[in-house]
Amino acid sequence: MAGAEARTQIGEDMRAKAAAKMTGARAAEALLAWYDREQRLLPWRARPGVTPDPYAVWLSEIMLQQTTVKAVLPRYTLFLRRWPDVAALASAELGEVLGAWAGLGYYARARNLHACAREVVRRFGGRFPETEALLRTLPGIGDYTAAAIAAIAFGAHATPVDGNIERVVARVFALTMRLPAAKPEIKALAASLTPKTRAGDFAQALMDLGATICTSRRPACGLCPLRPDCAAHAAGLAEVLPYREAKAERPIRRGTAFVVLRADGAVLLRERPPKGLLGGMLETPSSPWIAAERNGMADFEHAPLKAQWREVPGLVEHIFTHFHLQLAVYRAEVPVDAEVTSAASPERCRWIHVRDLHGAALPSVMRKVLAHALERDVRSGRAKPAARAAAAPARVRRRSA
Ligand code: SF4
């Protein structure tokens, strides 16, 4: 950054801090009054006068990481019905939890959810600890989630800062520093706004405002309770803030997926190693996903058995946070006594009937592979229902990538 630009920015940021002191109490009051009238009705939120359930708050916060409210709602209800409290979730098998999570993406969250439930039972007798410091010692609970649970479930004076809150705060103070470098500054400014009482409601009010009014594109400033105190609105910067560093382009990785359909209608699936990307989830046996420069397509060295492989035209593409995956798909039909080769780790393989695929712990990318391979089968009457079953739980929109 050039010297003059840097000085201008520092000056602006100092003004922003001064403004924070002046407007914090007034902004909090206006926002809470708006929240009391306009809050979204969400099943994990306690009604006024009702004590929040820490299990419900925790479950919803984990599910909402990187995922939209709309996508979370049915899955949250399903989880709560199946595992109504933390002890019930702790006694579930990991595979069951991963299966119920399938389609929500970012599967490390599901593994941590299960591990966290077990730790809450083992270390805290089934009651969530109330402080941010103790909450942060649990699997899958970082700074944001600890602050959200402490504030919302236990009324602690804590300030969670998610993407929505980040955007609102950067705008209210017209912070021109770029994200992600601006994160600590935004956190401090958000804390300066948090009132001594109703910190949980205040956090949820900021979340709601960011989701419904102070949206990324075209914020509805005319409806906003913070408009009298909003520096971005006054400066005509509402639509452009917060500034962000340009994201590096995702690298491409490629691989080959092998879909094996047995004569009795079962499909060969393999459990991925417990740690790492999609750990513990099921996959169609596949080659390693390698950098596009090294090709990675049509890699029959990793085929799970000897068969007449037919290429399924087209590629399956999937965007992960850090890379873009392209998979070539090959399929084969085999007799019921077909044997998996030792190179394909048969101890991790299992056959699952196509009608049971919807309940299997398959990540979205593998549902796409199965739908792609089975949809195109014109000779078998099983093809279309099978493709539908494979694709079923994968229709989920992410809150961000
Ligand atoms: S006035 Fe506009 S930019 Fe400012 S917080 Fe409200 S919606 Fe966001």
Image: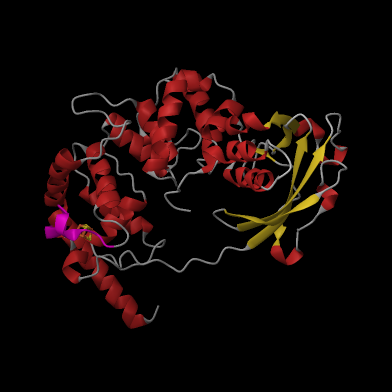
> At x 14% / y 40%, what residue is drawn?
37
Quadrant showing the N terminus: bottom left
Q: How many marks?
A: 0
Is residue 212 left or right of 330 when viewed as pictured?
A: left
Give the color scheme: rainbow, by chain, secondary structure or one colour. Answer: secondary structure
Horizontal and vertical percent position of residue 216 = 32, 59
- Quadrant of the displayed image that contains ligand 1: bottom left
Is residue 74 left or right of 160 when viewed as pictured?
A: right
> At x 13% / y 57%, what residue is drawn?
22
Horizontal and vertical percent position of residue 161 = 34, 48
> At x 23% / y 44%, what residue is drawn?
205
> Which span is picked out in magenta?
218-228
Q: Is residue 49 magenta?
A: no
Does residue 187 appear in this view?
Answer: no
Is residue 131 left or right of 99 when viewed as pictured?
A: left
Residue 68 found in image quarter: top left
Horizontal and vertical percent position of residue 333 = 80, 40
Relative to 303, residue 135 above or below: above
Front-lying residue, 145 or 35? 35
Relative to 249, residue 52 above or below: above
Q: Is residue 221 magenta?
A: yes
Horizontal and vertical percent position of residue 99 = 57, 31
> At x 51% / y 34%, what residue is drawn?
139
Relative to 108, residue 250 above or below: below
Does residue 401 appear in this view?
Answer: yes
Residue 173 found in image quarter: bottom left
Front-lying residue, 223 or 173? 223
Front-lying residue, 135 or 275? 275
Is residue 353 left or right of 244 when viewed as pictured?
A: right
